[in-house]
Image: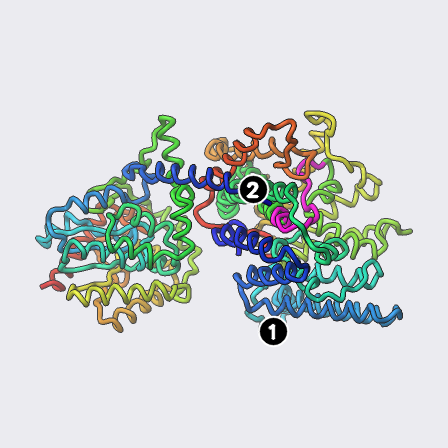
């Protein structure tokens, strides 16, 4: 079920009403209700793959229990390895099997040996990368002793399948979300109201910004051979806003929906395009994934506190390459990860990776010229990376970038043609800039914005969503990961 | 909780109210001026249909291939019978069935020609091709059945509660109209009457060859939905129950496009088999090419013919029709 669908518009109020009416008296009923509607939400897409979520939940719940029954670190480690093997095995099979088989055959073909392809017609279960990482965080945290293994199977199963963040995150840590399933939720007006606002803003980002950009981006990326520099830059920049609107919009809807049910999910985006270097970008973009890799891959490898610079470089590359590969079984994602590693490396080697921890121009209305320059430079680097992310294959990305240089034509007519969209994106940037000190753009200070103005903003936004929605519902980009 | 629900209710009521008003405003938009000029003209077409005093003797149904290829005046001149073209953009068999019912409530055609375009068999959605007709149909049993049986529950909710959303494609031309800017169709195409839309422009051969949408064509019969095929059968049964002859026809596309559709024979054979099993004549003019039609002369784009092509084609169709209804 897509968040931007009529189905979800009917599902959410029914589930919200049912949850607070039926389940307000008991934690067990609350969790059971969440589990039931989460499975319904997922099964709406394909009920067959529910068995995979149930299996994953069962495996990690049981392994967690087993680990809790012993203090022998060697035994606990074996259980952890089993959890890793099963979870990553499932992920590897469904997501990467065909990729590896094709690459293997390709490698032999290059040395003149022809092998018969043995690929399978595998459907990628939606959200597998997300819930696998979420269940893994549980077994790893239990192994590390950060979390007591839970005996409450219902809370655990509901934690793994919690519908707002099941298919595209935020990837929650067990230490943060699981305890919320072990306490009875009570309705909180402020929390629910803020949730509604965040849902509205998320829908706006997805439907109005991302989906409108998608139409132009698809056209430019499909016909890049005849386009000039101006058009190709426009394509890359609009894709940057498409993917941002798409994914951060999803996260906003997920977080807002969770708040309606009394849950507090982690922030996933923090105005990433106002970053002043790539390190800051990664602290603000897909935070739940980048911190997951930091905590469960980078730091266990030694992180940045290693004696040798080569090990540090290795660690950075491993994290970014794995992160790229996590996005999909395609060389484009791996190169995208490698590019970001290259952008990030100078910063960490020069100890500049933690230069900008706070939001830009916190006490000013406008950024300084230097900060503006840094933001634009960072954005340009990120856009180069997005070309690889968006391209069908490596050749497509390289040709796209080459065409940018080889056909230096500004083509103002294209800019004029998409003037309304460009103006819309500019307004969107303006709103985000004004609200950059807040968790999301619709978090208003009630003293500064009167009630009638807020009401007007909400209604106009809702009407924009209805009127500017594309002809067909567009799936969220991150569903494919 | 009460405060929250009260606020949500107020906002929802305001939004639905605004949405209904806006939907009503957008829906009344004169379709003569519809966006982009590539559309058909549903409002005008339905108005003309309901005002038609002569009995409709030959009825054309189908997608844009129908309303751009079967030129009613040529057909009338050749056949000596009244013709009405009920083709509409991306018209699926689901929509065709209810349009046929609506026509049959008022007329008793001597022949129905259903143009089959493979792409419309790949989707059951009705919010575009169905709604454009349903919105302008007169209240009556066919219209009610169309909404009740044809539209999915989800689409019924969308149409009833979110009309601004379902009619949103008219917002842009409406806004342009309000701002006093030209919103007339940019191309020379125009509504010629009796449901036909003819375009006088011609697509050059080099563009047809080098910028053809069918270069990346991947649709196959596996993409066809069972519901569309079921409705095709319902159309046959409906005609049979009233003893109205029915023909499945495929209007010609440019030869270059047909060549680019690598699996065209497979698609055509699929329809031929269905037609044979239902005992309906099947005329595929892409396989039995009319020599008078030439790429670079008689086609408006890589998919449709222009007015000159439609006139030539309609003469050829008229010859086959004569055999069918004699």
Instruction: Tell me the tag on residue B225.
Output: none
* Observer-nearest of B235 and B221: B235
Q: Is residue A68 left or right of residue A23?
A: right
* Observer-nearest of B192 and B264: B192
Q: Is residue B20 left or right of residue A422?
A: left
Q: Which numbered disc flags the more N-terminal residue, 2 or 1?
A: 1
A73 relative to B171, above or below: below
Determine contact: label 2, label 1, CB under 8 Å. Answer: no
Q: Which of label 2 and label 1 is nearer to you?
A: 2
Image position, residue A147 (x, y; %): 81, 59
Tags 2 and 1 on a common chain? yes
- Secondary structure beneath dot 2 equals helix
* Magenta segment: A255-275
Distance from disc 2 to disc 1, alpha carbons, whole Å, reads 52 Å
Residue behind mark 2: A200
Looking at the rendered image, the quarter that the C terminus of chain B falls into is: bottom left
Figure quadrant of residue A81:
bottom right
Residue at image position (25%, 44%) is B197
The outermost residue toward the right is: A307
* Observer-nearest of B42 and A18: A18
Counting other residues with Cα less than 10 Å from the Cα at mark 1, is it few (<14), some (14-19), or many (20 or more)? few
Instruction: Tell me the tag on residue A115.
Output: 1
Find out whether residue A262 is within the magenta segment.
yes
Looking at the rendered image, the quarter that the N terminus of chain B falls into is: top right
Q: Is residue A351 left or right of residue B291?
A: right
Residue at image position (12%, 64%) is B323
B245 relative to B178, above or below: below
Image position, residue A314 (x, y; %): 81, 54
Q: Is residue B225 left or right of residue B7?
A: left
Residue at image position (64%, 64%) is A96
Image position, residue A428 (x, y; %): 57, 34
């Amino acid at each position: 079920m897509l968040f931007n669908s009529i189905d979800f518009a009917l599902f959410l109020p029914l589930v919200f009403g049912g949850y607070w009416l039926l389940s307000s008296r008991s934690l067990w009923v609350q969790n059971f209700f969440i589990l039931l509607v989460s499975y319904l939400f997922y099964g709406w897409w394909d009920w067959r793959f529910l068995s995979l979520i149930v299996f994953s939940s069962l495996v990690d719940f049981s392994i967690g229990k087993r680990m809790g029954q012993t203090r022998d670190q060697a035994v606990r480690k074996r259980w952890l390895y089993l959890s890793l093997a099963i979870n990553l095995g499932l992920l590897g099979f469904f997501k990467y099997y065909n990729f590896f088989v094709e690459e293997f055959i390709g490698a032999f073909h290059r040395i003149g040996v022809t092998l018969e392809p043995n690929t399978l017609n595998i459907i990628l279960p939606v959200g597998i990368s997300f819930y696998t990482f979420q269940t893994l965080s549980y077994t790893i945290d239990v192994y590390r002793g950060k979390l007591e293994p839970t005996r409450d199977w219902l809370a655990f199963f509901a934690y793994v399948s919690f519908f707002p963040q099941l298919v595209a995150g935020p990837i929650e840590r067990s230490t943060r979300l699981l305890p919320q399933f072990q306490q009875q939720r009570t309705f909180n007006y402020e929390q629910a109201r803020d949730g509604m606002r965040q849902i509205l803003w998320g829908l706006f980002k997805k439907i109005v910004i991302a989906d409108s950009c998608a139409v132009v981006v698809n056209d430019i990326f499909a016909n890049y051979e005849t386009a000039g520099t101006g058009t190709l830059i426009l394509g890359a920049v609009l894709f940057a806003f498409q993917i941002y609107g798409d994914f951060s919009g999803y996260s906003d809807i997920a977080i807002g929906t969770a708040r309606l049910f009394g849950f507090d999910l982690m922030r996933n985006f923090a105005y990433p395009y106002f970053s002043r270097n790539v390190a800051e970008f990664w602290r603000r973009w897909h935070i739940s994934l980048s911190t997951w890799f930091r905590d469960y891959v980078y730091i266990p490898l030694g992180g940045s506190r290693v004696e040798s610079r080569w090990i540090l470089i290795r660690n950075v590359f491993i994290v970014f390459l794995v992160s790229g590969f996590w996005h999909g079984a395609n060389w484009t994602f791996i190169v995208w990860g490698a590019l970001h590693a290259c952008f990030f490396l100078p910063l960490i080697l020069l100890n500049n990776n933690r230069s900008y921890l706070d939001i830009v121009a916190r006490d000013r209305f406008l950024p300084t010229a230097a900060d503006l320059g840094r933001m634009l430079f960072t954005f340009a680097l990120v856009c180069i990376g997005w070309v690889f992310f968006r391209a069908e294959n490596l050749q497509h990305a390289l040709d796209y970038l080459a065409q940018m240089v080889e056909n230096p034509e500004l083509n103002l007519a294209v800019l004029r043609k998409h003037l309304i969209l460009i103006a819309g994106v500019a307004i969107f940037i303006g709103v985000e800039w004004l609200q950059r000190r807040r968790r999301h753009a619709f978090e208003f200070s009630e003293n500064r914005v009167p009630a009638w103005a807020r009401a007007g903003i909400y209604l106009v936004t809702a009407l924009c969503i209805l009127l500017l929605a594309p002809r067909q519902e567009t799936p969220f980009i991150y569903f494919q990961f | 909780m009460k405060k929250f629900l009260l606020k949500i209710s107020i906002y929802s009521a305001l939004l639905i109210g605004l949405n209904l008003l806006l939907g009503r405003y957008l829906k009344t938009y004169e379709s003569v001026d519809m966006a982009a000029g590539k559309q058909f003209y549903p409002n005008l077409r339905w108005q003309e249909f309901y005002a038609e005093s002569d009995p409709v003797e030959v009825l054309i149904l189908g997608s844009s291939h129908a309303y751009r290829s079967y030129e009613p005046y040529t057909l009338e001149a050749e056949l000596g019978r009244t013709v009405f073209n009920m083709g509409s953009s991306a018209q699926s068999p689901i929509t065709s069935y209810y349009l046929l019912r609506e026509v049959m409530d008022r007329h008793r055609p001597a022949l129905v020609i259903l143009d089959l375009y493979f792409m419309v068999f790949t989707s059951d959605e009705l919010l575009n091709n169905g709604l454009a007709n349903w919105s302008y149909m007169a209240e009556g049993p066919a219209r009610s059945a169309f909404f009740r049986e044809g539209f999915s529950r989800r689409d019924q909710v969308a149409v009833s509660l979110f009309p601004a959303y379902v009619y949103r494609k008219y917002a842009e031309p409406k806004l342009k109209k309000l701002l006093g800017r030209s919103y007339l169709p940019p191309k020379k195409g125009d509504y010629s009457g009796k449901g036909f839309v003819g375009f006088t422009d011609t697509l050059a051969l080099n563009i047809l060859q080098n910028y053809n949408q069918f270069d990346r064509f991947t649709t196959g019969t596996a993409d066809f939905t069972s519901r569309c095929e079921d409705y095709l059968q319902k159309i046959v049964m409906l005609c049979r129950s009233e003893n109205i002859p029915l023909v499945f026809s495929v209007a010609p596309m440019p030869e270059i496009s047909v060549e680019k559709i690598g699996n065209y024979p497979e698609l055509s054979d699929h329809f031929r088999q269905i037609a044979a099993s239902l005992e309906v004549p099947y005329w595929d003019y892409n396989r039995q090419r009319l020599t008078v039609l030439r790429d670079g002369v008689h086609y408006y784009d890589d998919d449709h013919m222009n007015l000159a092509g439609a006139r030539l084609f309609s003469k050829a169709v008229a010859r086959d029709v004569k055999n069918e209804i004699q």
